[in-house]
Image (tube, rainbow, N blue to C red):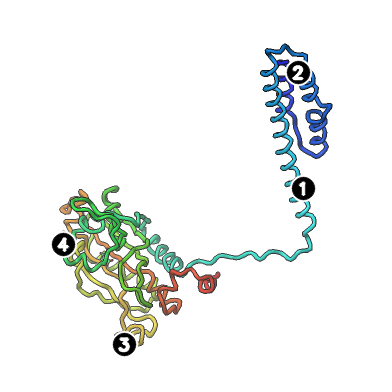
């Protein structure tokens, strides 16, 4: 008995059911009243009484496995055949509309920025949006409790006395730190990405926006190199006729620091609503990397120097595409986005 059960089990397992005829043949072979499993059930009464319960159990298992195989093969075949029918029968239905995606205006602007810097030999580095307080502030030479930290209203995630807090990065500058800790000079990277600030939301400012950071470290890097890089970038990005001005500024991680304006590319510098009649638009902050920042990353400031810059991306997208509310950039409303189809 046991051998025959085993044999039948093997046969069931190996039985190929690829069409309805084979399904029917399987049913006739194993499942009907005169099938081979039923035949064995019939012989049960002749088995020795003490073996009967065990044989019965074996036979039940065999029957269940045949049922399972039959059911699953039937389901598969019927799914195939409805699919088949649909494919054949629905030829006259109108085609389904395919929705074409579009590139987000911020990504278009970022793409142009990346291309310009890539051509100058910068590579792209990225870092996490959830950042350590020490990378976002301390290592960038923000002293503890220094008012400079308040320039960037921060979303903290965890904040415990005596521990490095977790926060949403307020700028892309911490990626500088990550790059300098990982690589040794020469370093030439741009770091694009999202940053977060806990600011009042309005048409002009939002709690999340995009920045592009730049970092160049090597021997003998000077402020003149910084100026040349920014000049070249600005002319390619905003038009060859724009003029630039560097205004002295302050950032803890650069010394000296500057903010850079270009002549308003909407009015050509004569004064309009967007540039508030000044003729100038601010595009970025920059400066020579502070020796403390280099030291924090084990780079010798006696041997190496470098410049860094950081610019906003969203404002350029707003100006370029004449969008009057920054919130539209983050709402993912298809009616807005589909205007940017290629
Ligand atoms: N991280 C600054 C900010 O978000 C921007 C900035 C200024 C970045 C000067 C720099 C820099 O790398 O050198 O306000």
Quick one: label 4 or label 2, which is nearer the N terminus? Answer: 2
Q: Is residue 158 visible?
A: yes
Secondary element at tag 2: helix
Residue in the foreground of this view, choosing between 100 and 83? 83
Residue at numbered disc 4: 145
Which numbered disc flags the more N-terminal residue, 3 or 4? Answer: 4
Q: Which of marks 1 and 4 is nearer the N terminus?
A: 1
Q: In the rendered view, tell whether residue 196 sits above or below residue 15.
A: below
Label 1 Cα neighbours within 10 Å, binned few <14 / some 14-19 / many ≥20: few
Q: Name the residue under label 3.
A: 277
Q: Where is residue 126 in the image (x, y as percent from the top left)?
A: 36, 55
Q: Give the quarter of the image for residue 70.
A: top right
Q: Distance between the residues labelled 1 and 4?
A: 71 Å
Q: How far apart are marks 4 and 2 (CA)?
A: 88 Å
Q: Return the residue nearer the eye: 53 or 171.
A: 53
Q: Do the residues labelled 1 and 2 touch (CB within 8 Å)?
A: no
The residue at 60%/65% (across/down) is 99
Mark 1 Cβ inside 8 Å of ligand 1 = no
Q: Residue at x 23, y 65 (%)?
A: 287
Splitting the image into four quadrants, where does ligand 1 fall?
bottom left
Image position, residue 142 (x, y; %):
18, 60
């Amino acid at each position: 008995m046991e051998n025959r059960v085993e044999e039948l089990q093997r046969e069931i397992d190996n039985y190929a059911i690829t069409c309805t005829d084979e399904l029917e043949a399987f049913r006739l072979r194993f499942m009907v009243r005169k099938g081979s499993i039923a035949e064995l059930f019939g012989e049960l009464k002749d088995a020795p009484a003490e073996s009967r319960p065990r044989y019965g159990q074996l036979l039940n298992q065999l029957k269940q496995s045949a049922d399972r195989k039959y059911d699953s093969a039937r389901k598969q075949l019927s799914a195939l055949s409805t699919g088949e029918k649909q494919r054949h029968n629905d030829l006259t239905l109108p085609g389904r509309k395919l929705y074409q995606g579009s590139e987000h205006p911020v990504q278009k602007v970022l793409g142009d920025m990346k291309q310009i810097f890539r051509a100058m030999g910068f590579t792209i580095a990225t870092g996490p949006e959830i950042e350590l307080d020490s990378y976002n502030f301390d290592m960038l030479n923000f002293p503890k409790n220094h008012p400079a930290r308040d320039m960037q209203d921060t979303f903290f995630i965890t904040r415990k006395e005596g521990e490095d807090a977790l926060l949403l990065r307020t700028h892309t500058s911490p990626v500088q730190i990550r790059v300098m800790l990982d690589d040794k000079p020469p370093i030439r990277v741009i770091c694009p990405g999202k940053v977060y600030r806990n600011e009042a939301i309005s048409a002009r400012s939002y709690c999340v926006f995009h920045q592009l950071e730049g970092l160049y470290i090597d021997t003998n890097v000077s402020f003149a190199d910084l100026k040349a890089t920014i000049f070249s970038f600005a002319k390619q990005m905003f038009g060859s006729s724009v003029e630039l001005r560097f205004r002295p500024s302050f950032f803890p991680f650069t010394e000296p620091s500057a903010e850079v304006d270009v002549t308003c590319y909407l009015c050509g510098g004569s004064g309009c609503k967007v540039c508030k009649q000044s003729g100038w638009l601010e595009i970025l902050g920059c400066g020579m990397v502070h020796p403390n920042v280099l030291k924090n990353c084990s780079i010798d400031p006696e041997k190496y120097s470098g410049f860094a810059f950081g610019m906003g991306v969203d404002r350029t997208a707003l100006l370029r595409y004449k969008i009057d509310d920054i919130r539209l950039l983050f709402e993912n409303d298809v009616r807005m986005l589909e205007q940017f189809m290629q």
